[in-house]
Image (cartoon, grey):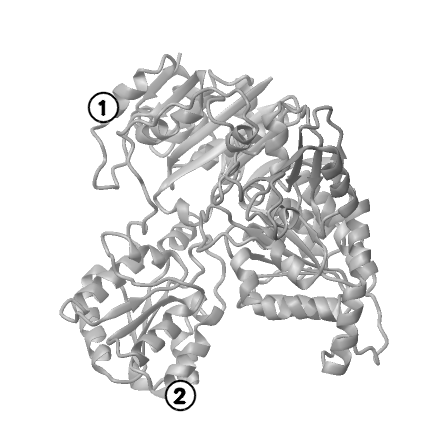
Amino acid sequence: MKNDIVLAGVGGQGILTIAAIIGKAAMDQGLNVKQSEVHGMSQRGGAVLAHLRLSSEPILSDLIAACTADVIIAMEPMEALRQVQSLSPSGAIITASKPIVNIPDYPEVEAVVAELKKHPRAVVIDADEIAASAGNARGSNMVILGAVSRFLAMDAQTLRDAITGFFARKGDAVVAANLKAFEAGRKAAE
Amino acid sequence: MAQRLFLGDEAVAQGALDAGLSGCYAYPGTPSTEILEYIQTSKLAAERNVHREWSTNEKAAMEEAIGMSFAGKRAIVCMKHVGLNACADGFMNAAVTGARGGLAVVVADDPSMHSSQNEQDSRYYGQFAMIPCLEPSSQQEAYEMMSKYVFGESEAKGTPILVRLTTRLSHSRANVEVGEASPIPAAVTADASDRHFVLLPAIAKKNYERLCAKQGTFEAMSEESPYNAYLEGADKSVGIVASGIGFNYVMEAFGGKCPHPVLKISQYPLPKKKLARLLSECQSIVCVEEGMPFIEQQLRGPLADPRIKGRLTGDLPRTGELNPRLVAEAFHLDLPAVPVVSPLVKMRPPRLCDGCPHADTYRAINAAIADMPNARVFGDIGCYTLGALPPYNAISSCVDMGASITMAKGAADAGIGPAIAVIGDSTFTHSGMPGTLDCVWEKSPVTILILDNLTTGMTGGQSSVGAGRMEAICAGLGVEAEHIRTIVPLPGKHDENVAVLREELAYAGPSVIVARRECIQTLRHKVKK
């Protein structure tokens, strides 16, 4: 079993949280993990990228080679599109649809989404709206994780356990809210 | 054996703790920061009272670690690559004094400059100082080097050891098998008459001769090192020298089974016998190194041996970090065509956070000098370097820690005016104080803005040793009390702040304006707690 996952977003959107939860779940399932991320200046409102590799075999490179990723997970549509070079021809894209417009030349978001949907396995969901409906307006990243859970070679329960573990110190209410957002995202990607 | 998911930085930290570390000394710098941060949150470190406070700068950190080694205890000093420049004096001379308690100098290089001004390769410093250098290829290897190898060897051979990391190891997590923590060993004792650490010429000459004489020992260490390995391969048309994480990219490119002989290098000086074997068996050699062509240059020699290929021959890019695709291309493997990125995708550079105090300060500076075409603003290292980008376009320089003040002074000496320095609180105490003293001594017409956000912001909010005390420090340096001003960078205080700036810009001597407001990120974390 192997999953090569590219995670993309804008600094502050919580992609490293998604990566940390999947990574923990994978390790609990006895898989090998490598997760590369960039800290420092690039986190300040710019494009953020992480590579996450899971495998039952030993993992060599910390980075995923071009054209080999199984999944692109994005919290922002243009950031999803930025990473298409990573994707294998049979890979999937799961992205939130809401743009973060913090640059003057941000393209028409409809054009970005249309470009993404040209891909045979693209799931574009309004994660903010789904999170708000689930009563957790700050849980967009957990909505995306829920949607992604349908595309990973990993047991959904292991992911739920990892979410519980990740938010445990913030109390039961926070854990429950994040699990609810996760389920809503999982449903949206049915 | 327990399994943990560790960043390379964390593997280094846990390995050092498990080896019986007594102190970690560091100044924050991407991608090295998480080493000391890990030790600060480690229960084991707290139980053992391991030293784990931030130092004022890398020079202080280096010398504090040398002091701990002098006292016979195990120490690490950690920094980013350019931090080694700031403490090169102590580093080079620690090679001459030698170590007593185990001493590891851990330096994280940042090829591709994700968060840095250059991509210098610390292996050259190891060679320059003539000490052993380790370059782990994985998080597991980093843990093992630190927990089982570095400190014992440092004590046995009486030398500091350099450990070189790169961004994709420092900031990549992987499962690491962790062993039991060893107790902190008793201090390595020395007679009070031992003068190794007294680098008077008469003693330094003997020490240096001894360091030169140790080179054979260091080469033998590399030859026998568990981290350098010769992997057999049937196809000898090409031999591969792969160092650090370059080794992983090579193995990835060949699907885990490389048909060519591979010499994996994770310890220097270079193991000559192993290299000689590879060179004698193979028709040509490809060097795969993260960073500068350090091995390649040595193998090519001054006459540029055409059999040696790598970054200098264009088989790999001359600059930037490697990735598995680039390495696979160097071996002309059959690869799928990479799709073109849609032209809809635009650059999204980093920017100051919404509500950042630096943004208000830059708006005030720009307004204050709008009618002063000869004014120049000299920047420094921190989040506020982003003031170089739109919409501020506010600074004309960013060179090295502390250079805002000294460059402003030099430019003022040459007739530029007003000459304005913009420097953060942590950078000011790191290396802004000597330049301020120069300005005071010469009464230079330099206006220094200290952006005191009460933290070391860029690296994630570490303590800043002088935060909140900038006025007292500047007064102590001799800046006149009436020219030490404090402003609060908020939109509502814009006009007031511009007026203060204009008053001090009109003064033909050194003045300091402390723009103090807490970093929006550290404030947010506090509110969350």
- Look at label 2 and name its amino acid: Trp
Whole-percent x, y for residue B504 in the image = 24, 79
- Look at label 1 and name its amino acid: Ala
Q: Nearer the viewer, residue B152 or B376?
A: B376
The quadrant in which the N terminus of chain B is found is top right
Residue B441 numbered tag: 2
Q: Is residue B9 above or below residue A51?
A: below
Q: Is residue B151 above or below residue B442?
A: above
* The furthest residue to the front: B303
Q: Nearer the viewer, residue A179 or B348?
A: B348
User: Which residue lies at the image location 29% right of the left edge and 82% below the top edge?
Assistant: B445
Q: Which residue position is annotated with label 1?
A: A111
Secondary structure of the residue carrying tag 1 is: helix
C-alpha span from label 1 to label 2: 61 Å
Q: Is residue B100 visible?
A: no
Whole-percent x, y for residue B432 in the image = 43, 72
